[in-house]
Amino acid sequence: MASGRRPGTVRRDGWRVDTDPERVERDLTCLVLTLVELIRQLVERQSVRRMEQGDLSDEQIETLGLTLMRLEGAMKELCDHFDLSPSDLNLDLGPLGTLLPMD
């Protein structure tokens, strides 16, 4: 190439987009799992709120608890499969802090 850039690389004012297929796949997987984990945590918090308010029957609490435990286990399996740690899923939002609460 006359510009000296690698194919698949875009330069604008110092920004570079690298389209390495393995890197893109890992980053996309990380993003999807981050969104699933965020939703899982939100559902868990809402479930605890509803339980504390007395809005759920004992049977609903049991079913919800079992479902949330299975979902958490599935998330751990997916993270293991893709060699990701929980900290990999916690996006840094700069001055806003991290996306997921630090437990």
Image (cartoon, helix red, strand yellow):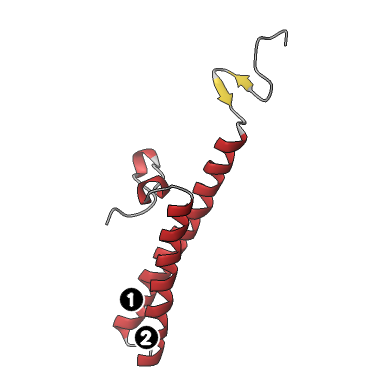
The picture places residue 28, in percent across and down from the top left corner, at 56, 45
The structure residue drawn at horizontal position 59% and vertical position 27%, both measured from the top left corner, is 17
The picture places residue 63, in percent across and down from the top left corner, at 42, 84
Left or right: residue 92 versus residue 25 is left
Taking depth in this image into account, of 53 and 63 the one nearest to the observer is: 63
Question: Label 2 neighbourhood size at 10 Å, few (<14), some (14-19), many (20+)?
Answer: few
Instruction: Tell me the quarter of the image containing the N terminus.
Output: top right
* Real-space CA distance between mark 1 and mark 2, rounded to the nearest whole angstrom: 12 Å
When asked about the image quadrant of residue 66, the answer is: bottom left
Determine which residue is flagged by label 1: 48
Taking depth in this image into account, of 94 and 9 the one nearest to the observer is: 9
Identity of the amino acid at label 2? Glu
Q: Nearer the viewer, mark 1 or mark 2?
A: 2
The structure residue drawn at horizontal position 67% and vertical position 25%, both measured from the top left corner, is 8
Instruction: Tell me the quarter of the image containing the C terminus.
Output: bottom left
The structure residue drawn at horizontal position 37% and vertical position 79%, both measured from the top left corner, is 65
The picture places residue 70, in percent across and down from the top left corner, at 42, 72
- Farthest residue, direction right: 1
Identity of the amino acid at label 1? Val
Determine which residue is flagged by label 2: 62
Question: Label 1 neighbourhood size at 10 Å, few (<14), some (14-19), many (20+)?
Answer: some
